[in-house]
Image (cartoon, helix red, strand yellow):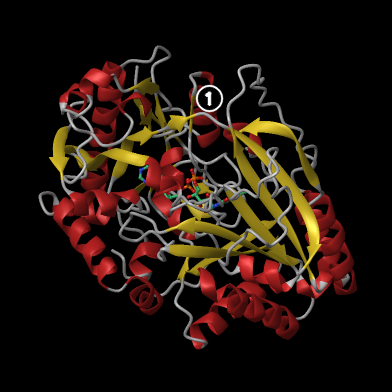
Amino acid sequence: MARIVEVPETTWHNFHYTEKNVPVAARLELHRDTSPSLDDMRDSAEAVQQRIAAAIAQGRQLRAHGATWAFSPVASIPGGWPLATGYANQLFPVPASHVAPGFAGDPEGLVLCQTGISVAELNMWLEKRGRSLATTGASNGQTIVGAMSCGTHGSAVDHPGIEGQVRAIQLIPAPDRNLWIEPESRPVTDGRLAAMLGATLVRDDRLFAAALVGLGALGVIHAVVVESRPRFLMEMHRQRLPLTPALTAAIAGGDPAGAGLPGQVGPDGQPRRPYFLQAVVADHIDAGHVVITAGYQRAWQDDHVLDYSINPKRGPGFNLAVVVANIMAAAPGLIPPITKAVLAGELSPIDGSRLTSWGQTFNFTTPRAGQAGASLAVPVARVHDVLAICHGAVAAVGPAPVAFAVRYATRSPALIGFIRFDRSAIIDVDGIDMPATRAVMARVVADVRAAGIPHAEHWGKLNQITPASLAAAYGPALDEWRAARAELMAPSPAAAAVFASPWTDAAGLT
Ligand SMILES: Cc1cc2nc3c(=O)[nH]c(=O)nc-3n(C[C@H](O)[C@H](O)[C@H](O)COP(=O)(O)OP(=O)(O)OC[C@H]3O[C@@H](n4cnc5c(N)ncnc54)[C@H](O)[C@@H]3O)c2cc1C
């Protein structure tokens, strides 16, 4: 039966150890029954409500988390109760009979996901049933709720982040409230599903947009409805190319048609638009070149084999990145050659000969420690200004094991989704976690701010967020998000403190 198990541990860390030795009162785990049922999900929501009541009674803070892949302190709750959701992973197709009449999307594609389902599990479940997610992150180990709560994105050029596929949210903001939130302008269900889960149906565009990226600060999200699409195949290509003027323009959102992207000419001899596009630019170690990954959508083939086994190159030693970091710290002169060698291994050519489903295209394992990532969303036309700042930061800081990747997405439907521009480029600063890497990350943000380039930082990656930077990035949308939070918490003011954290307080969010 659904229940919350209390594990008597006194410290907490995230998966990649960028947050570690966080003192906690205990660690909590949300468990489900072995046989899936909506009754069990109803019991599960009640268990969460009882724990929120206990948190209020004991003056504790509580924060749900997924895979703890966020590098930032967004999931940390010092002194409180971290609630692990990964075991609560039931999935049900939403019957077409329960879909709201007039629903504008695909009524055959709606899936009820309990909070802890991972993106990789969801991919596998959907693709066996002829469906697919339209976009995910570049790795798939996050939970769907953890990923949406920070606005996780991939590089599907015509799609927003993962939260763009969420159509309804079951949110538990207080001991006596269990809400099923859908947009009023786009109702999704007829209300019976909410009733079966013991939830109150709320149709409200603003509350829905607030809860799409909620950072765990609005309560516990117990389930979401995701809209899937028919499954498809990807033909992926990767090539290191000279940075020509046409490619330079395409990277900044120009017409990719004449840019000579790898695999651009399709089987019919015609140029095609990439579904997925990523550019890795590393002037500091490979000047004048760029590594382009381009993926093209292909029709599903009935004989396609859905084999998800992966062969992670760094699997046997999850601390290899730490070892490498220590070598580089001891011998900074080795940083450029090691970075170049690692990049060459990670970005080896792909020739498009193997077609993969969306879920097969991305990896769901990751080295556990030693990595660090930061990301900024900017208007796509400003890509080269930001890349120049990135390379200037490496020049100023000195040798650093970092690379810069450009990915693309469209504007987030969430009030505080960090992908804020209609056509956004997301500049990833990825590297081995050592002081030089962190210094480059901080310098990039400082210089982007100084240059007045509109931007927002990824909530779940290492960031330099302050109340002032959030006000500059989100403007009135941030006030709307805070107002939505206040409205959700108003009937039970004590719960507002439960779902704050030192980090959200310092950022002026709570
Ligand atoms: C190897 C790696 C690869 C990555 N790749 C990408 C990428 O391609 N694109 C990208 O955008 N980001 C990427 N990230 C960042 C990562 O996707 C995000 O930080 C994401 O939010 C992590 O999801 P999670 O399930 O681990 O959530 P967690 O880290 O566990 O939590 C993240 C946030 O979600 C909240 N949350 C989780 N569950 C609930 C719930 N049930 N109710 C309420 N709040 C909840 C938490 O409180 C927290 O605020 C990557 C990170 C790593 C480590």
Asked whether the viewer can see residue 451, the reply is yes
View extreme (front): residue: 269
Residue at 25% across / 71% down in the picture?
A: 476
Up/down of 236 relative to 223, above or below:
below
Q: Nearer the viewer, residue 8 or 315?
A: 315
**Residue at x 83%, y 71% (from the top left corner):** 285
Image location (x, y in percent) of residue 334: 89, 68
The quadrant of the rendering that contains the N terminus is: top left
Q: Tell me where residue 69 appears, x and y as whole percent.
A: 55, 48
Q: Amino acid at mark 1?
A: Glu
Kindly state the secondary structure of the residue where label 1 is placed: helix
140 vs 356, left or right, is left
Q: Residue furthest bottom?
A: 450
Q: Estimate the x, y position of residue 314 in percent, counting from the top left.
A: 79, 43
Find disc 1 in the rendering and name its residue. 127
Taking the image as shown, residue 13 lies to the left or right of residue 37, namely: right
Above or below, 46 against 501 in this view is above
Q: Quadrant of residue 30?
A: top left
* Residue at image coords 59%, 76%: 386
